[in-house]
């Protein structure tokens, strides 16, 4: 019985963590999207190692995102990747969405829409949809817990 209760506690804790991560991602996306990208100079671009360090990810993560089409920096033949301020903004949003549990596939559709619109509406809509999913899983867990309690009470 105690093992079952531990499993339920862990499931509730995971949902709580996901809900908190979503709130942080929503706040970060709003702040990032509101930042002006003006007065851009070539010296504002960042290399892969520099951006990876700033984001707290590995350079291989940025290269993977490039290969997946999420954040595609400027790059000439035989030249290193150079991330413009707009690329940096996109990478920051991808970091927050990944932390909120988004997988690469859905981000392939979401990031280009955000980039074209230049606004956070699509990102916020995706986070709202994710919130609804967490709510549904939370309700299902509560219903399952109630059914289990009724079953155990009838032993």
Image (cartoon, grey):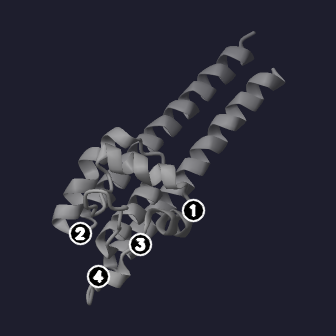
Residue 40 appears in the picture as rendered: yes
Q: Which mark is residue 37?
A: 4
Q: Quadrant of the N terminus?
A: top right
Q: Is residue 138 above or below residue 146?
A: below
Give the CA distance from mark 4 to mark 3. Answer: 14 Å
Of the image marks 4 and 1, the number of the one nearer the N terminus? 4
Asked whether disc 2 touches disc 4, contact meaning CB atoms under 8 Å apart, the reply is no
Give the CA distance from mark 2 to mark 4. Answer: 12 Å
* Image point (48%, 55%), residue name: 22
Mark 2 or 1, which is nearer the eye? 1
Q: Which residue is mark 2?
A: 119
Give the CA distance from mark 1 to mark 3. Answer: 14 Å
* Image point (36%, 83%), residue name: 43
Of the image marks 2 and 3, the number of the one nearer the N terminus? 3
Mark 4 or 3, which is nearer the eye? 3
Image location (x, y in percent) of residue 144: 57, 25
Of the image marks 2 and 4, the number of the one nearer the N terminus? 4
Crowd band around label 4 with a 10 angstrom C-alpha radius: few (<14), some (14–19), many (20+): few
Image location (x, y in percent) of residue 114: 24, 61
Image location (x, y in percent) of residue 138: 52, 39
Q: Which residue is mark 3?
A: 46
Q: Which residue is mark 1?
A: 56
Left/right placement of residue 99 relative to residue 7 reads left
Crowd band around label 1 with a 10 angstrom C-alpha radius: few (<14), some (14–19), many (20+): few
Residue 131 appears in the picture as rendered: no
Mark 2 or 3, which is nearer the eye? 3
Give the CA distance from mark 4 to mark 1. Answer: 22 Å
Q: Considering the numbered disc 4 on the image, is that residue within a helix, a strand or a loop?
A: loop
* Image point (55%, 54%), residue name: 58
Q: Toward which corner of the image does residue 4 lie, by quadrant?
A: top right
């Amino acid at each position: 019985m105690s093992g079952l209760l531990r499993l339920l506690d862990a499931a509730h804790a995971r949902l709580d963590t996901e809900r908190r991560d979503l709130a942080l991602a929503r706040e970060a996306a709003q702040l990032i999207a509101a930042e002006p990208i003006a007065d851009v100079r070539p010296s504002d671009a960042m290399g892969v190692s520099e951006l990876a360090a700033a984001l707290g990810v590995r350079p291989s993560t940025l290269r993977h995102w490039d290969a997946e089409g999420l954040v595609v920096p400027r790059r000439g033949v035989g030249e290193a990747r150079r991330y413009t301020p707009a690329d940096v903004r996109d990478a920051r949003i991808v970091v927050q969405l990944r932390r909120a549990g988004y997988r690469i596939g859905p981000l392939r559709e979401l990031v280009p829409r955000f980039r074209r619109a230049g606004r956070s509406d699509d990102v916020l809509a995706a986070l709202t949809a994710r919130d609804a999913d967490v709510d549904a899983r939370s309700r299902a867990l509560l219903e399952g817990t109630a059914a289990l309690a009724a079953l155990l009470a009838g032993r």
